[in-house]
Amino acid sequence: MFFRVIPKREIPDLVRGLAHEFEVVGPVAKGESFVFAPLTDPSELRLDYDTTLLPAKQWFFPASETLMRFRVADNAVVDDSVDVTPRVLFGLHPCDVNSLLLMDNVFLGDDPDPYYKARRDNTLIVGLSCMPTDTCFCDAWGTDETHWGFDIFLSEIGDDYYASIRSVKGAEVVDRYVTGREVTEEDTAAFQARTASFKAAFASDIDTSQLPVLLDAKYDSGIWAELGDLCLSCGACSMVCPTCHCFDVHDELEADQTHGTRVRTWDSCMFRDFAEVAHGNFREVRAARVRYRYYHKQWGYLSRFERVLCVGCGRCTRACKAHIDPPRVVRALQTGVVDR
Amino acid sequence: MAPRVVVLSLASDFGCQVQLSNMTDEILDVLGLIDLSYWQLASSGHMPDAYDVAIVEGAVTTDEHVALLESVRATAGVVIAIGACANTGGIPGLANLLDLDERYGVVYGDGDGPRVAAGRRAPMPLDSVIAVDYHVPGCPIDPPEFLRVLSRVLLGLKNRVPDLTMCASCKINETVCFFDRGELCLGLVTRAGCGARCPSLNRPCTGCRGIAPDANLVAARAISIASGRPEGALDDALRIYNTAKEVRG
């Protein structure tokens, strides 16, 4: 890794430059909220955003994507190409950069998913420092920092960004499109001070002590039934989650019924039919589904990849009308009581 | 042999049949696959005696409707209910909230009402009278969904209507939640499948697709109250499309 100081005023140059080579996607305003969307002009970029409605996963694993088109008469695949628009995701906070690393474990393992991989290989990641909001709890999982998974990471220091450059591609675009300057000891001190104030700003006090043990020991706890009674089974939590990756695959025929497409769509373990199989449904009740979600995220994935499958971005906290989120569930596990 | 199809209407505004005629990009493809024997909106002839598939819109509101449906069921191998009226009783179903004798009097004059409206029934969805094989809910129906269902009919695949609620679709659309804007939205409990079209066009969901089997009404009522609505507000709002279903069960 090496470093440059990039004045904030040079960011529009960087974005304009990147736009020659890539589709540049960054946070833009949508009503009072923000979304990641392709930029048509650097002025749309809102680097002061708090969080986005949907996370960055949609740019690698879209909510709905065509895997292939086929001909009905002989079951032949007529098109299985993957959209590989070269793209930059500009301005991902540390939680979101970390979420992609967690998704990589799932999609880029022994048998990589060609759709996800093609997009991942063709996407540059520009990270961005942030300040915690009242729904952030990335500090609980250590995902408030990231040292991998980006090409460039911009940490705000006054009128400049302290840019960490992690990849050759990242270095190339910085060289090509911004002037910047060498980092001084003062800049690094400012970066450290910035980090300290970031860490001090967290309001969350989520106690994750012995969480896997508690999940097993409290498998039959009444908290799950209580949470199940509150849950709307709407799946909003899974849709907005940057690490939820379950999908459904189905075929749709075109109007003339001669060709069809195989489509992959986001799914959720909150949906009743998610666990419906030939002999019945193995998670028929809401309580079982809520419990499963937390088991998978905080224990199942952990036992396989040594990280929990949550980055504390707080999107579920904002999206869930029933206020079921990791801080509340972890508190319930610690205390045995679901807060009202 | 292409399946012989009839399209007919009970109590409704024919809006769903209009939606079928709005499928300008696909209708010629569809017509190539079926033998359209009768289309109430577009035909001047009569219902044939024999057909394979019956596409029915509208609520059941008279004894005549019941007799017609019984004959349809005895004739057709497949019955498809299209639209809110046919699937939940829809807007006609609101009449279940009223004293029908009194209302007919208001409309047709004292004394004459019951006579003029002889054979009337409290409006009900199709499946309160006959078994329905496929459902395309919504007011009006969504042509792409209708085509997906028709495709399943032609292939002999079973009915597959989403049981889940609307919220996931809104998240995918990145629609800012109406509850976060201080407005009630029935997507919280309404059956998905339309892609949350109204919210994406800046209108809260009005529940035209019916209450989702997986909806948690108890939790949704509590959320409505916690968001500052009076008690009963959610159920009141649901009535417009869901009164008949509510009355029925």
Image (cartoon, grey):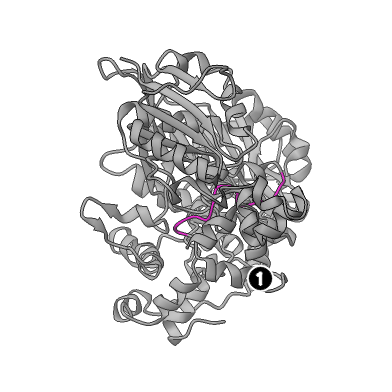
User: Which residue in the rendered view is the most extreme toward the left?
Assistant: A279
Say which of B83 and A69 sits in front: B83
Question: Could one spot residue A79 in this view of the protein?
Answer: yes
Residue, x 72% and y 45% (percent of image)? B202
Image x and y of residue A305, in percent: 32, 58
Foreground residue, B240 or A243?
A: B240
* A110 or A12, nearer to the observer: A110
Q: How crowded is mark 1: few (under 14 residues within 10 Å), some or many (20 or more)?
A: few
Which quadrant of the view contains residue A8?
top right
Q: Is mark 1 on a helix, strand or loop?
A: loop
Q: What residue type is labelled 1?
A: Gly
Helix, strand or loop for the magenta stretch, by majority: loop
Residue B210: x %, y % from top left:
54, 51
Which residue lies at the image location 43% right of the left edge and 48% below the top edge? Answer: B129
Q: In which quarter of the image is residue B235?
A: bottom right
Residue found 41% across the figure and 56% down from its top? A271
Above or below: residue B209 compared with residue B152? below
| Residue B206 falls within the magenta-colored stretch | yes
- Left or right of residue B178: residue B173: left
- Locate residue B16, reporting x and y percent: 59, 33
Magenta stretch in the rendered image = B202-214
Relative to A263, B195 lies left or right:
right
Q: Residue at x 65, y 36 (%)?
A: B13
Residue A121 against residue A300 in the figure, above or below: above
Chain ID of residue with mark 1: B
Residue annotated with mark 1? B232
The answer, for residue A185, to whether it is visible in the render is no
Answer above or below: position of B246 versus B158.
Answer: below
Which residue is nearer to you in this view: A143 or B218? B218
Q: Is residue B123 magenta?
A: no
